Each structure stands twice: as structure tokens, then as C-alpha cells.
Amino acid sequence: MYINEFIEFLRVQKRYSERTQQIYRSAVERFYIYIIGVEGKEELESVPDKELLSLLTPLNIRSFIASNLDNGNSARTTNLMLSAISRYCRYLVVQEKLESNPMDMVVRVKEQKRLPHFYSKDSLQEYFSTPVEMDYKSVRNRLIIMLIYATGMRRQEVANLKLSNFDSARKVFKIIGKGEKEREIPIIPILFENILLYLQCRRNSYPNCSSDSFFLTDKGAQLYLNFVNNIVKEELAGLKGFDGKKAPHALRHSFATHLLNDGADLNSIKEVLGHSSLAATQVYTHNSFEQLKKVYLTAHPRAKKGG
């Protein structure tokens, strides 16, 4: 099937992560399943590629959009699926299976702009100032929260982190991020101290462990994505100042927002976050403006009540 060839192209040529490959495959398969009316992807595999190609029309894609919105999917989710379908169509055009990309004739769904959710400095400072038990689980969980906030690592980067990524001499992490892009992240002193504490605790708790995984589950296995999610939820649940969604990306957003508010330049933040373009990083300038507006409305004499 062309879908399988497309996913192989993403894996080998584009070096997309396994999760990204799954997202792209799911989007294309969901489109076909809706248009054809089959029960699932098992039935889809019996449909000839030639017939599948004929279904890639602007009219069918618009119908798919309407169906998604009617079923309660957000504009953002729908547009993410459209991006995957468009990438698939571009691949087929290059392979000379399609004459043109039908997505060029389709208008994307308008999305409401959302500012990245982040936590306040005071809330995070209060969390880190509370004592932590010296058992492996407690030390590990505290370090994961600190690591994401101090380095801006993605959830997947934390889960895939290796002992060999830690350069103790230079005090940096060597990370392989999205698209197999390498970057180095400096380690601040307080984080370095906690890493050394954690590694000692890891050796004591798992003396016979030969795994290169930096973090281990309670059973000594490599972390998985939902495990990282659960740690963040567990650590921040019920604490003052951590309203809204408790997730790794909120800590990453906090890292970027606080750096920008404290005067770090956008290009430096872009490099540490591992963004491929400056446009992805510029979203944090909106948070900085909101912070500036809040200070202005609080401090300016003519902005105060009765001023």
C-alpha cells in the first residue's frame, strides 16, 4: 500500500519519531475509513491503491473536515489531520501517483489563538523548596520535574534520556530531539547537584541494572511517555498555583516563558528548546506581552482604580 510506503519514507528519509509516524498514519487511515465507509483499517487494506488515489479530492477532504467538526473535534485537531493528509498527498505527487495536491484547494479550519499554559515562578519555587524523601521514586520524580523546568526538554526526550547523554565533565546534556536533530543543553548548578544525588540513589536502588536508560520505572525498566505524564500529575496535584492541566509541556512552556521574561533572547531559547524555526518560539512573546500588560495595569498611576 502507498500508505505503508509513505510511512517508511517518513521513518527513513525524514527520520520522524515513531509517535509522529503513528499520527500521520492514523490521520490518513481515518480519512479513507470515513470516505469509504469501512469498519476499520483491516478492511481498508483490501482496497486497491488506485481506488484510494481517486478518493483524494477537495470535495472528499471538505466532507471529512465537516464530519470531524460535527463529531466534536477541535479546529486544531482537525488541522493536524489535514496537515498529515497534505504531507501524504505531496509525497504521492513527488512519486508521480497524483498530478497535484488536492489540499491546495482546501481552506483550513480557523483556529482560536491559545497562549501556552505555564506556571508562575513563585509556585515552582514553593514546590522545589519542599523537602523530598530520599527513596528512589521520590528523588526520581523531583528530578524529572526539575529537569523539564530547568532544560525545557520534551516529554519524549525525558523518557528516552540515556546515561550516555549526560556529560558530567562539561555539565551538558546531549539530546537527540525531533527529526533526529542533535543539541546540547547546559546544566545549571542546582540541577547538576540533584542529578548526582539521583544517580547515587539509582545505583543504590538498582545495583545490578545494566540499562543505559537515565530514568527507570519503579520496576527498573525504561520510562514510557504516559509514565512521565503520570509523574507530573502526581507531583503537582493539589498544590497551590498549579491550576489547569498538569503536564510536561506546561513545565516546558514555563521554562521558555520565564527565560524570555528575564531577558533571554529568542534565538537562544529556540536553540535550547530544539525548535526548527523561530516562528515556533515566538508564541512565547505573547505570554511576555501579557506579563507586561499585567505589570502596567497594576503599577501605572493612571491605570489604577480612580487614577
Image (cartoon, grey):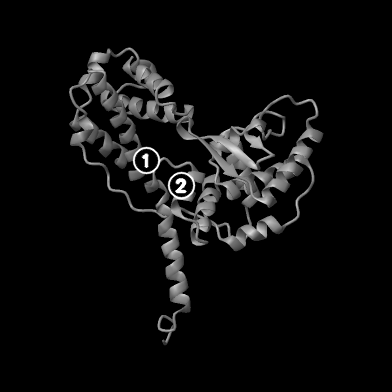
Circle 2 sits on which residue?
A: 270
Task: Say above or below: 286 vs 72.
Answer: below
Q: Nearer the viewer, mark 1 or mark 2?
A: 2
User: Which three-letter amino acid code belongs to the residue tagged 1?
Assistant: Thr
Q: Position of residue 179 (x, y in %)?
A: 45, 31
- In the drawing, does residue 129 fall left or right of residue 35? right
Circle count:
2
- In the drawing, does residue 210 fall left or right of residue 286? right
Q: Which mark is residue 290?
A: none
Residue 74 visible, this angle: no
Task: Say above or below: 118 vs 25.
Answer: below
Question: Residue most toward the front?
Answer: 170
Q: Mark 1: which secondary structure?
A: helix
Closer to the camera, 167 or 121?
A: 167
- How much space separates mark 1 and mark 2, taking CA atoms? 24 Å
Residue found at x 43% / y 64%: 290
Residue 182 visible, this angle: yes
**Quarter-wise, where is residue 88 in the image?**
top left
Few, some or many residues within 10 Å of mark 1 (<14, 14–19, 20+): some
Closer to the camera, 263 or 284?
A: 263
**Quarter-wise, where is residue 241 in the image?**
bottom right
Q: Quadrant of the C terminus?
A: bottom left
User: Which three-letter amino acid code belongs to the residue tagged 2?
Assistant: Lys
Q: Position of residue 299 (x, y in %)?
A: 48, 78
Q: Position of residue 273 (x, y in %)?
A: 50, 44
Q: Which mark is residue 77?
A: 1
Disc with the residue nearer the chain's start (1 vs 2): 1
Q: Position of residue 278 (x, y in %)?
A: 39, 47
Q: Quadrant of the N terminus?
A: top left
